[in-house]
Image (tube, helix red, strand yellow):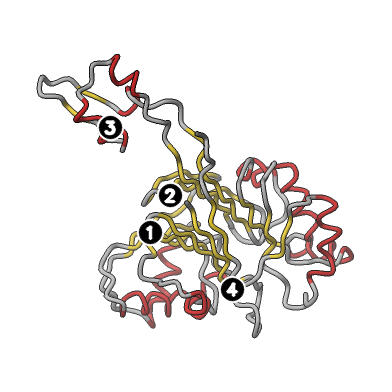
């Protein structure tokens, strides 16, 4: 299971009903945060989620509405007696930007590890999350992220017996361990597991024009969270000027990527009645929904029995 919550859906400036950009994922006791705009701590408190288990923070870029809430969050995590290392991922310059913000949060009881993205794409695995960062098209260097939870194949009793693997090793092999038998024989999970099953995939992108990199990265996602800075069709010119997106451009990418569901986020402060534009969006992509602060879903593995 992958638990997803939109903590903040606003762009540029916070509003009384709309905090700035942030999204959290939770899986097996570990949390991953994407962006940390102003109000992130309040949104977490309102949701009843703790910041202490956050093991990974991914930043799309370093505009203030995406990172301004970080110093306070770090202090809160430290005050919760967190001691485990925290990994941060972001575009080039990450360590410099974070250290500048930490002038007001200088002493923390945990280590911060920095991973700076220097290529158009990067893939890595951390705390059970398979993370794919991909370059998008904003007026500063900016990345989107896909987060996947892989799912191994089913345990195949007949294969295990055919390979003469002692039964006492079966459960550990099923959990992914590589083992050596008493006679030195090496047993691997691939010897007892069937083909990998469909996992869970969530793709998140904001502050960008539509790009083929987004469509490719989001392909087949269970959930696609995409910026919808502007809802009014006449603001397409403005979207192009400031390198943002309209609702309709986001819907077109969702359709082409074959995602199961799309949530819109990162709204302009001037956008008040976003719901008025949803019918037109659903003409392009029927499974489109308006993101809102606190919106939550539990993405489950498919039952393939």
> Which element is circle 3 on?
helix
**Residues at circles 3 and 4 in contact by the CB criterion of under 8 Å:** no
Within-10-Å neighbours for mark 1: few <14, some 14–19, many 20+: some
**Residues at circles 3 and 1 in contact by the CB criterion of under 8 Å:** no
Give the percent coordinates (x, y) of residue 40.
51, 75
Distance between the alpha carbons at the discs numbered 3 and 4: 45 Å
Within-10-Å neighbours for mark 4: few <14, some 14–19, many 20+: many
Looking at the image, which residue is at 54% across and 78% down? 38
Give the percent coordinates (x, y) of residue 259.
67, 45
Say which mark, if any, is on residue 65. 4
- Give the residue at mark 2: 129
Q: Which marked residue is nearer to the observer: mark 1 or mark 4?
A: 1
Q: Is residue 187 above or below residue 137?
A: above
**Residues at circles 3 and 2 in contact by the CB criterion of under 8 Å:** no
Distance between the alpha carbons at the discs numbered 1 and 4: 25 Å
Please name whichever residue, 268 or 303, is drawn nearer the observer in this view of the structure. 303
Say which mark, if any, is on residue 56. none
Say which mark, if any, is on residue 30. 1
| For marks 3 and 2 on the same chain, the one whose residue lies earlier in the sequence | 2
**Residues at circles 1 and 2 in contact by the CB criterion of under 8 Å:** yes
Say which mark, if any, is on residue 173. 3
Q: Which marked residue is nearer to the observer: mark 4 or mark 2?
A: 2
């Amino acid at each position: 299971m992958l638990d997803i919550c939109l903590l903040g859906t606003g762009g540029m400036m916070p509003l009384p009903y709309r905090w700035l950009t942030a999204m959290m994922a939770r899986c097996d006791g570990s949390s991953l945060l994407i962006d940390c705009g102003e109000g992130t701590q309040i949104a977490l408190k309102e949701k009843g989620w703790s910041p202490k288990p956050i093991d990974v923070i991914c930043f799309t870029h370093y505009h203030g509405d995406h990172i301004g809430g970080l110093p306070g969050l770090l202090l809160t995590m430290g005050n919760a007696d967190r001691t485990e290392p925290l990994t941060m991922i972001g575009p080039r310059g990450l360590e410099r930007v974070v250290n500048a913000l930490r002038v007001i949060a200088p002493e923390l009881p945990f280590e911060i590890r920095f991973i700076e993205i220097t290529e158009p794409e990067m893939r890595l695995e951390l705390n059970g999350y398979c993370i794919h960062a991909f370059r998008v098209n904003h007026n500063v260097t900016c990345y989107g992220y896909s987060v996947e939870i892989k799912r191994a194949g089913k345990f195949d009793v007949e294969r295990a017996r055919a390979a003469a693997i002692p039964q006492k090793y079966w459960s550990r092999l099923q959990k992914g361990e590589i083992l050596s038998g008493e006679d030195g024989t090496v047993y691997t999970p691939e010897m007892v597991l069937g083909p990998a099953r469909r996992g869970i995939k969530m793709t998140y992108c904001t502050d960008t024009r539509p790009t083929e990199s987004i469509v490719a990265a989001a392909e087949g996602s269970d959930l696609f969270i995409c910026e919808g800075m502007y809802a009014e069709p006449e603001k397409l010119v403005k979207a192009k000027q400031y390198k943002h997106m309209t609702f309709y451009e986001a819907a077109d990418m969702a359709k082409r990527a074959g995602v199961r569901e799309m949530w819109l986020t990162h709204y302009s402060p001037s956008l008040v009645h976003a719901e008025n534009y949803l019918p037109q969006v659903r003409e392009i992509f029927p499974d489109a929904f308006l993101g809102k602060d606190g919106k939550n879903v539990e993405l489950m593995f498919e039952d393939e029995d």
